[in-house]
């Protein structure tokens, strides 16, 4: 109940709960804000199911900042990360392609997308 009707501080703590049901209740809360979703999407301390839920939910992943946070998060499913790559700006793609914290396939796809877009920098 606290995960559903609690304030932002309660949600911040409960989203990292080891019980998957509690964490999923937090992310489904009607009171959760876009800023909280962005923070959760970038966090590696949350359950994989929460990240997967955000990535698969159109309402939760509509903001650019959330898409960037999901792509940068190594817990995000590879298929979802590859889907969101197409929405990223040149500078963010460049940073993703150089990142050591993401899967190699994602970095390779980011490099390929940069090349297709005609990135002038080397």
Image: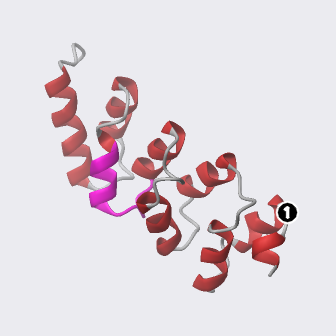
- The 10 Å Cα crowd at callout 1, few under 14, some 14 to 19, many 20 or more, is few
Whether residue 79 appears in magenta in the rendering, the answer is: yes
**Relative to 121, is 78 above or below?**
below
**Relative to 7, is 72 above or below?**
above
Residue 7 appears at what percent x and percent y?
A: 85, 63
- Residue 95 figure quarter: top left
41 relative position to 15: left or right: left
Q: Tell me which residue sits at (62%, 54%) in the image.
A: 37
Q: Nearer the viewer, residue 62 or 97?
A: 62
Residue 29 appears at what percent x and percent y?
A: 69, 67
Q: Quadrant of the N terminus?
A: bottom right
- Residue 116 figure quarter: top left
Q: Tell me which residue sits at (33%, 33%) in the image.
A: 93
Q: Tell me which residue sits at (19%, 44%) in the image.
A: 108
121 relative position to 10: left or right: left
**Relative to 90, is 101 above or below?**
below
Q: Nearer the viewer, residue 59 or 96?
A: 59
**Relative to 28, is 78 above or below?**
above
Start-end of magenta stretch: 73-84
Q: Tell me which residue sits at (31%, 41%) in the image.
A: 85
Counting labels gives 1
Q: Quadrant of the C terminus?
A: top left
Residue 47 appears at what percent x and percent y?
A: 53, 74
Residue 102 appears at what percent x and percent y?
A: 35, 53
Q: Nearer the viewer, residue 43 or 53?
A: 53
SS under mark 1: loop
Pointer 1 residue: 7
5 relative position to 90: left or right: right
Whether residue 51 appears in magenta in the rendering, the answer is: no
């Amino acid at each position: 109940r606290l995960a559903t009707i609690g304030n932002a501080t309660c949600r911040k703590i409960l989203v990292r709960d080891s019980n998957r049901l509690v964490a999923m209740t937090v992310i489904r809360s009607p009171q959760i804000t876009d800023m909280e979703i962005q923070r959760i999407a970038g966090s590696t301390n949350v359950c994989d199911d929460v990240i997967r839920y955000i990535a698969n939910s159109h309402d939760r992943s509509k903001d650019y900042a959330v898409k960037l946070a999901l792509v940068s998060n190594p817990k995000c499913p590879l298929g979802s990360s590859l889907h969101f790559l197409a929405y990223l700006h040149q500078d963010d793609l460049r940073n993703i392609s150089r990142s050591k914290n993401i899967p190699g396939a994602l970095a390779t796809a980011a490099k390929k997308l940069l090349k297709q877009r005609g990135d002038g920098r080397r």
